[in-house]
Amino acid sequence: MEAGDHRDQSIAGVAAHAQLLPDDILACVLRRLEPRSLAASRCACKGWRAVVDGRRLLRTDLLPLSLYGIFFMEIDVLCGDPPKLFANPLTSRRINANLDYTDREEGSRIIENHCNGLLLLWGNMVVNPATRQWVRLPPPPPRCTESGMEGFYDDVCLAFDPTVSPDYEVYMVPSVPCELDPTATIFTEESEWPPSSCAIRVFSSRTWRWEERSFLRRGEAAGTIADMQQYTEFQRRYTVYWKGALYVHCQNDSIMRITLSDGAYQVIKSPAGGKMNGSAHLYLGKSNKGVYCALIYHNLQHQFQVWLLDESCGRMGWELKNDIKFAPVMAKISLVKYKDGFPNKKKHKDQNLRPWIFLRGNCFDEDVKQALTEDNAEWDYSKGFILETQDLKVNSDHMHFEEVYFLGFHPYKEIVFLWMSRDTAVAYDFSSSKVQCLGKLHAHWIGKSFPYTPCWIGELSEK
C-alpha cells in the first residue's frame, strides 16, 4: 500500500470518528485551526464541510479576494502629501486613503512597503487600512559591526500571510550606498554583492523584537559593489512576498530570492539580463500564478513585456507571457476619449462599470468592518470599454512622445494597470490582449503605486 493511501485512510478514519461529535463541539475544534488547515479539513468529508460552511468558519478573519483600488503617492510626498487612492465607486467609500487616523508626525504617512493588505509606513509603523488599526514598531538596532555593513542602505520589506498566521515580519535587506566608507566597512568596490553571508535585521510581531539573521547565498553573486553603485541613484526598487520567500529587486535589476524558512538566498537574473542601461524600466510584482516582471522600453512604440518566473522542478527561469507595442493603443484611446468620452453613469447603469475616482481622503464614516464584508465590490473587467490590441497596427501616426507608466499587477487576475499620458488609467489583460479604460487619473507624477486588496479584518498583532 502506498504512503498516500495510508494518509487518505487516516483522514477518513478521523473524519468518521468526528461524526460522533455534536456539531457544536466539532465547530469549536475546527475553529482553532489556522485558515489554511481549516480549508484542508473542509475537504475531508461532507459533514465537516457542512459544519465549516454552515457556521462560516473558513473566512471569519479573511476578506473575500477583491481589489479595492490603487494606492499611490505623488512625487511631492516628502513634502507631506499623504497617500491617495484611485478606486472604483463601490469600494472607494470604504477606505480612508490619506491614513489621517495614524500618527501625525512629519513624514509618518510615507508608504515604504506593503504586503497582503498591510502597509509599512516610514518610521516603522504597520497599518491595516481595512480596519484603521495601526501600531508603531520599536526602532531597529544598529547593525552588528562584524557585518561590515555600517553606512549601507536598507530595502525595507514586509512579510505577511494571513492564511498562515496573523503575525508579520519586517526585513531590512542591505543595499550598496553611493560611496563606501573604508573606515567603517570591510567591503571594497571589487567585493562581490550580495555577499556569501548576508546579515539582515528582522522584526517579528510574534516576539516583538528585532534580531540579526545571517542568510547564506546559493549560487553566484549579482556582481560587484562597483556594479551596484552605477544604479544607486534615482532607481525605484520593488519587493514581493510569495509563499514563504521574499523577492528583492537589486540595484542592477537582478533579484534576490530569500527563503525565510531555511536562511538561504539566491540571485536570479532579470529577463533583461541586467544590461538595461536606462533603455527600460523593470517592475516586479505578483499575481495569480506567482512572481511577475514587467518591462517598459523607452522607445516611440512603447514596447511592453510581461514575464512569469517559472520555479517548477527547482529551476528559476523567466517565461515571456506577453509582448506588445502600446503606441497604437495610446493613439486609439486618445481618439475615443475625445470623441466618445470615458465610461460614465449615463452610458453604464451597472455601478461596477462607472469610472474609477481619485480619492484624497475619507468619504464616509460608516462601520468599516461591516462595509468590508459586502459582496459585489469588484470592478467588472469582462464588460465596458475594451480594445482588442491584436487588431491595432503600428504606423507613423502612432508615434507618441508621452510615457506609459506601470501602476501594478492585479493580485489574482492576469491584468496589469498602466497610466498613459499622465491622465488615463487602463487595465491591460495580458492573457487576452484586451485594454479597458478605468477613468481619468490626473496627477503631476506618481512616485510609488500598488494595487490594494484587503486581506485581514482580525486584530493587528501588537505587543
Image: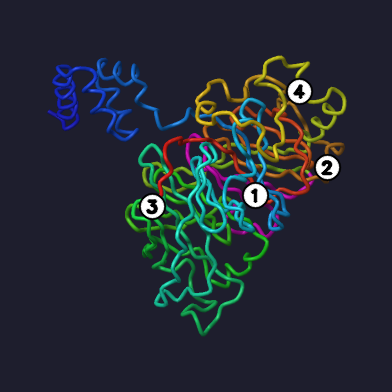
Which stretch did the figure color magenta?
272-300
Q: Closer to the camera: disc 3 or disc 4?
A: 3
The quadrant in which the N terminus is found is top left
Q: Which mark is residue 343?
A: 4
Measuring 87% from the left and 36% from the top, which residue is drawn there? Answer: 397
| Residue identified by numbered label 2 | 400
| Residue identified by numbered label 3 | 463
Q: Badge 4: how crowded within 10 Å, few (<14), some, or many (20+)?
A: some
Q: Which amino acid type is shown beneath numbered disc 2?
A: His
Q: Earlier in the sequence, mark 4 or mark 1?
A: 4
Element under label 3?
A: loop
Alpha carbon of mark 2 to alpha carbon of mark 4: how far?
A: 24 Å
Measuring 37% from the left and 62% from the top, which residue is drawn there? Answer: 215
Q: Badge 2: how crowded within 10 Å, few (<14), some, or many (20+)?
A: some
Tell me whether the residue at label 2 lies in contact with that at label 4, contact meaning CB atoms closer than 8 angstroms. Answer: no
Task: Classify residue 248 as left or right of residue 295.
Answer: left
Alpha carbon of mark 2 to alpha carbon of mark 1: how far?
A: 24 Å
Q: Earlier in the sequence, mark 2 or mark 1?
A: 2
**Residue 274 in magenta stretch:** yes
Alpha carbon of mark 4 to alpha carbon of mark 1: how far?
A: 26 Å
Residue 241: x and y in percent read 46, 47
Q: Which amino acid type is shown beneath numbered disc 4?
A: Pro
Q: Quadrant of residue 49?
A: top left
Measuring 26% from the left and 19% from the top, which residue is drawn there? Answer: 48
Task: Classify residue 13 as left or right of residue 230.
Answer: left
Q: Badge 3: how crowded within 10 Å, few (<14), some, or many (20+)?
A: few
